[in-house]
Amino acid sequence: MKSILIVLLFGINVFVSPASADELTEILSSSHRSDENKSRDQARHPKETIDFFGTKPTDHVLEMWPGDGWYSEILAPYVKDKGHFSAVTFATGNLNSSNKRDAFWSKNALIYQEKMSDKSLYGNVDFFEFEPPKSFDLTGIKPVDVVYVIRNLHVWDEYGALNDAIQAIYAVLKPGGVLAIVQHRGDSISQNASSAAEGYLGERYVIEAIENNGFKLASSSDVNLNENDTKDYPKGVYALPPVLAMGGTDRDKYVAIGESDRMTLKFIKTVN
């Protein structure tokens, strides 16, 4: 019986109706998205990625550490009318911190929250804060259908907080809910260990870490594969677009490579 239930859970959220697909297409071309953000669709494949995760307009979607909201400005309108969107940002109380990274992230979070407070575009977005390794408290979030974690695992891993972060996410997902992972993918050398200092993580490393915390890998996709990414740059993944951390040094080379090679993994919260 248990095995049958798990199989049934794996079938949840895998069908996206043509109407939903049309809705996504309209959102992607909408004027609320900047030309710069639209230009990244070719590298990030948002429609194909969202379809792969099986996200529906009726879902309660939670995005972890959404940055400047590149994915949020797609996901929030998608679920605005029939579902709900919540966001877990960086902590906002570190604006005056001597740690420049924390101060930057606090400023980023405040700008994001102001942007996403436009109810006509995004609905009634709920905001929460998450500050590993100091705090993993996600209490107050109503059970969600899908959690998106887009290119954040390497930061939590760098802090030694990956397991705690995954456990916090597990707690807010409904049984059978989806953990949607897009992450810079390391080469074969890093398959058994983290190379998070450069922003990349081994795919096997990620799968084992997540499955060890109550999830089951349901499927993977090469939708965000980039075979041009050699993953051997002086500043790691940040040498590539959109950051281009090397400045003018070999800029044309990095632009030609494009955004990083990314694993795209769909996990299911299993039933004990």
Image (cartoon, rainbow, N blue to C red):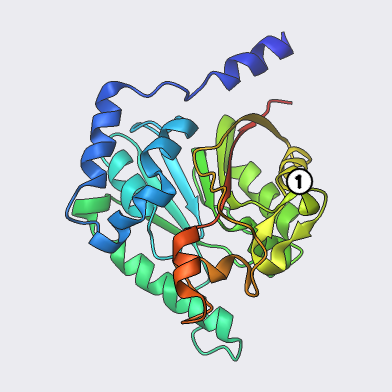
Q: 35 above or below 140? A: below
Q: 133 above or below 247? A: above
Crowdedness of circle 1 by 10 Å Cα count: few (<14), some, many (20+)?
A: some
Residue 133 seen anywhere in this rendered image of the structure? no
In the image, 246: left or right of 51? right
Point out residue 236 in the picture as x, y percentages from the top left corner.
63, 68
Front residue of 259/230: it is 230
Q: 240 above or below 249? A: above
Identify residue for label 1: 209
Front residue of 259/174: it is 259
Residue 122 seen anywhere in this rendered image of the structure? yes
In the figure, residue 3 lies in which quadrant? top right
Q: Total number of numbered labels?
A: 1
Q: Residue at x 47, y 25 (%)?
A: 13
Front residue of 106/143: it is 106
In the figure, residue 60 lies in which quadrant? top left
- Quarter of the image that includes the C terminus: top right
Q: Residue at x 40, y 65 (%)?
A: 68
Q: Residue at x 41, y 32 (%)?
A: 51
- Quarter of the image that includes the N terminus: top right
Under circle 1, the secondary element is helix
In the image, 130: left or right of 61? right
Q: Residue at x 51, y 21 (%)?
A: 12
Point out residue 129 in the picture as x, y percentages from the top left corner.
52, 64
In the image, 20: left or right of 163? left
Point out residue 71 in the picture as x, y percentages from the top left corner.
39, 52
Q: 108 above or below 45? A: below
Point out residue 132 in the picture as x, y percentages from the top left corner.
66, 66
Kind of residue sitting beneath label 1: Ala
